[in-house]
């Protein structure tokens, strides 16, 4: 059969390539990376979290970052792969990355919605949801970013299984969402920050999206978001807008960031990467490197702040 496609950090890799990359980068960096299985997707693909950090044996605090919750947002998994590469290749030479990985762990889930992501590679490039099936409807999937137990299905979501923002039949009805929520619940004592990577619009969002009420930590979350956005902008001048989801993009319940925040993970952010609509979800591969380089600056800014506070 065809040889699996070679992995590239500046191309959009399909799932088989990402999965084999996860195995190879873990085995070739066993001092810094370990792989943690958190469950299978609806169609039976393995969800693995990469735990990145110096192995000290003692419990370290952690940052959790996920990518690829929405299938068509291809720049998102590309960034998670870029982050892992940057972490292992600059540990020992970049003082901030070295300090971060000595003191904390970063849990990276490169693709949450693997079934949907693969479907965008094989069938429908604009697919968003999971690929779960339910009797009683021929429509497939639910919006995983409406399926978390945070104001579930109260606003900015649909209870119609055929809608792209279908909230699911109950909170965490999507196995991919349940697997992530279970992992974060199990580790909530050490997880100090939750970053979820989407595209597009160039936004740095934080709770809440399920209500117009300001979060208790609004001013601190805003301060950190603005610092991260200006760090990002320093590289190529890319402009991001920071703010609570409800007023900065639109009100929407069931989002992963709101759920993590209400669980007690204070530094909870949703990144909406490039661009602002010229290419949208179809961001050209030529923009993968600059997008990932500028986003690294924002993520490192937040990580450094979390490390100190
Ligand atoms: O609708 C979404 O889930 C995000 C916005 C968002 C972000 C956090 C919590 C609730 C909603 C926007 C996007 O990433 O899906 C881009 N889009 O509108 O397709
Ligand atoms: Zn999204």
Image (spheres, rainbow, N blue to C red):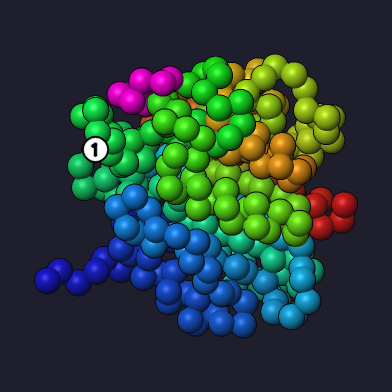
Q: Mark 1 points at which residue?
A: 124
Q: Is residue 160 magenta?
A: yes
Residue 114 position (above or below residue 170): below
Q: Residue at x 41, y 21 (%)?
A: 159
Instruction: Indicate the position of residue 174 as horizontal and vertical percent values.
Output: 42, 42
Instruction: Indicate the position of residue 226 as horizontal and vertical percent values.
Output: 76, 35
Q: Nearer the viewer, residue 173 or 27?
A: 173
Q: Residue at x 51, y 35 (%)?
A: 171
> Magenta part of the protein: which range?
158-164
User: Ligand 1: does it lie within 8 Å of the C-beta at label 1?
Assistant: no
Identify the element where label 1 is drawn.
loop
Asked whether residue 300 appears in the rendered view, the answer is no
- Answer left or right for 26 relative to 151: left
- Answer left or right for 88 relative to 217: left
Q: Residue at x 78, y 28 (%)?
A: 215
Q: Residue at x 72, y 60 (%)?
A: 62
| Numbered marks: total | 1
Q: Nearer the viewer, residue 100 or 115?
A: 115
Q: Is residue 6 magenta?
A: no
Asked whether residue 36 appears in the rendered view, the answer is yes
Instruction: Indicate the position of residue 43 as horizontal and vertical percent values.
Output: 29, 52
Q: Give the main secondary structure, helix, strand or loop, of the magenta stretch.
A: loop
Q: Badge 1: few (under 14), some or many (20 or more) residues near its Cα, within 10 Å?
A: some
């Amino acid at each position: 059969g065809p040889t699996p496609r070679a992995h590239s950090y500046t191309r959009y890799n399909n799932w088989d390539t990402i999965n084999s990359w996860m195995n190879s980068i873990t085995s070739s960096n066993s001092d810094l990376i370990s792989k943690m299985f958190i469950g299978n997707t609806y169609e039976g693909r393995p969800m693995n979290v990469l735990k990145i950090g110096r192995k000290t044996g003692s419990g370290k605090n952690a940052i959790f970052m996920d990518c690829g919750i929405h299938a068509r947002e291809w720049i998102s998994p590309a960034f998670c792969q870029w982050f892992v590469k940057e972490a292992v290749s600059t540990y020992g030479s970049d003082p901030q990355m070295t300090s971060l990985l000595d003191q904390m762990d970063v849990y990276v889930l490169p693709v949450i919605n693997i079934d949907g992501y693969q479907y965008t590679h094989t069938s429908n490039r604009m697919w968003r949801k999971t690929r779960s099936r339910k009797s009683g409807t021929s429509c497939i999937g639910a919006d995983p970013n409406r399926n978390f137990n945070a104001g579930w299905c109260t606003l900015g979501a649909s209870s119609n299984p055929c809608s792209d923002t279908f909230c699911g039949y109950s909170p965490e009805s999507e196995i991919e969402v349940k697997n992530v929520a279970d992992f974060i619940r199990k580790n909530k004592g050490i997880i100090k920050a939750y970053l979820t990577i989407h595209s597009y619009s160039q936004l740095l969002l934080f709770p809440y999206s399920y209500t117009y009420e300001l979060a208790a930590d609004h001013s601190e979350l805003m301060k950190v978001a603005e610092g991260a956005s200006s760090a990002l902008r320093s590289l190529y001048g890319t402009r991001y807008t920071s703010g609570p989801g409800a007023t900065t993009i639109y009100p929407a319940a069931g989002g992963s960031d709101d759920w993590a925040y209400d669980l007690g993970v204070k530094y909870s952010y949703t990144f909406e990467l490039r661009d602002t609509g010229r290419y949208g979800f179809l961001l050209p591969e030529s923009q993968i490197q600059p997008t990932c380089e500028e986003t690294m600056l924002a993520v490192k800014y937040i990580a450094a702040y979390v490390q100190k506070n």
